[in-house]
Image: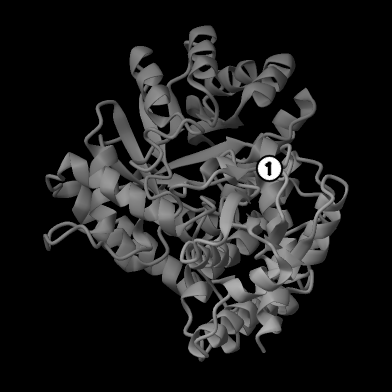
Amino acid sequence: MELNKKNLGFGSLRLPWKNGKLDIETIIEMIDEYQKEAFCYYDVHPHYLAGKSEEIIKRLVVKRYPRETFLLADKMPFVCKSKEDYENYFEASLRNCGVDYFDYYLLHCMTVDIYANHEKLGGFDFLLQKKKEGRIKHIGFSFHDKPELLDKILTEHPETEFVYLQINYFDWNNPLISAEENYQVALKHNVPIFVMEPLKGGRLIEKHISKIDRKDISMPSLALNFVSSLDGVDIIMSGMTTKEHVTQNRKLLQNPVTIPSNLYSQINDEIRNENKISCTACHYCEQECPRDIPIPDIFSLLNSLDRDIWNTSLKEFPGARYKVFLEEYKTYTSNKGKAGSCIKCGRCELKCPQKLNIRSYINIANNTFEKSSVDFIWKRFYTVCGLMRVSQKGLILKEWFLVKNYKNIAIYGLGEIGRLFFNEMLKYPEITVQYGIDKNSEKIKINGLKVVSPDANIEKADVIVVTPTFAFDTIRHELAGKIDYPIVSLDEIIDFFE
């Protein structure tokens, strides 16, 4: 069976679950809908779906459809440590899939270290031998690194017949992913491109489109039209989860619409503001974690919390909605490692296709969900309400500073509360805010205010006011050895007026 250009690939990484088990009924509907057209490319991996993807494809495709009606692609895991591992993994995959050969077979997740290991063990030679035996029709690899390495591999291995690349409009100019540069390298070598993550793990379809007023443009159409318009693309993989996804994606590829080029940059800006952690839930990190931490699930919670909880009304905050996040966290980690069990080994980051600073985010999760998280929320809530009470009473914050004879102050923490406090201080000509202190000083731009890092040489002031009151003791301890003037919590000022 030959491959049609711009074929919709059926990815098995994100097939649906129901009540803790794979949703077989829905998957059958998806496969039957997929097989109706000339879409026939199934992509599996020994570790996808908690190790069940090969078995599912065997049960629902191989045993239900003639072998000549579909193409099957599988992957060599990147954990190979010996030549024997190649043979063992390959034979196990054939058995698990119930086939005599693979139409496409890949060396998986190529990076500098993984490529060096395959070169040492003879990974490409193994694939060539299996192709000679007729057990592989086409050989290639999936890639998650810089264009210089891709050029090196394709130069040293011209036998490569296809390459999987992560391409979507969000990552096109992302220096961590190098999507455009990698695409250009593959074109230069005239190697067919199979696109991974065209929807970035579903993140490109999760939001409302405020910039679009045309009925024929949807978030999926934005993403699929972008990759389908590229020369050299043969397969567009999609991690579909419903029959409707299959139908919709097929129609979008068969009937593309014209998308204004400036629309992509506008949507990118909105997405960056909404999702702080660009995790696609591929679970490669989780497979590497020695403490079995459910990293993608935890990141999903952090993104949801960042988007939602701070927009909750004061009447609800921080009640039932926050408890939902805590309960979800407890569910995700009930039989797995917690964020606090991270040993910071970095193995997860070496395997992350998105090049995320996983250890830093896990530390945030630890502080958010484990380290007195309820106290953290209530302290922030108390501070906000305290400022409101002072304002509603018609009291003036400057009185506290004048009583203490503090006329030149510094503000530690320039998040939402810190900015509110700074703007309040601007009303009082008797008091000067000399500078601000924040760990994200390089990213903070406030007109008329110098912002420095806590690690910098801190100028003298009459007092430093700490606005992240939930971390006051920690901040005071950090600054105590560097300064010899008062450090006070914003709550202390508020309490003066209560």
Name the one closer to the observer, 156 or 371: 371
Residue count near mark 1 (Cα–Cα under 10 Å), binned few <14, some 14–19, many ≥20: some
- Viewer can see residue 481: yes
Q: Secondary structure at mark 1?
A: helix
* Residue bearing mark 1: 92
Q: In the image, 311: left or right of 480? A: left
Q: In the image, 424: left or right of 467? A: left
- Quarter-of-image position of residue 173: top left
Q: Is residue 291 above or below residue 453?
A: below
- Viewer can see residue 331: no
Please state, as top left, top right, bottom left or bottom right, where the N terminus lies in the image.
top left
Q: Residue furthest top?
A: 156
Q: Position of residue 191 (x, y in %)?
A: 38, 19
Name the one closer to the observer, 109 or 263: 263
- Quarter-of-image position of residue 4: top left
Q: Is residue 308 above or below residue 226?
A: below
Colouring rule applied to residues:
one colour
Q: Amino acid at mark 1?
A: Ala
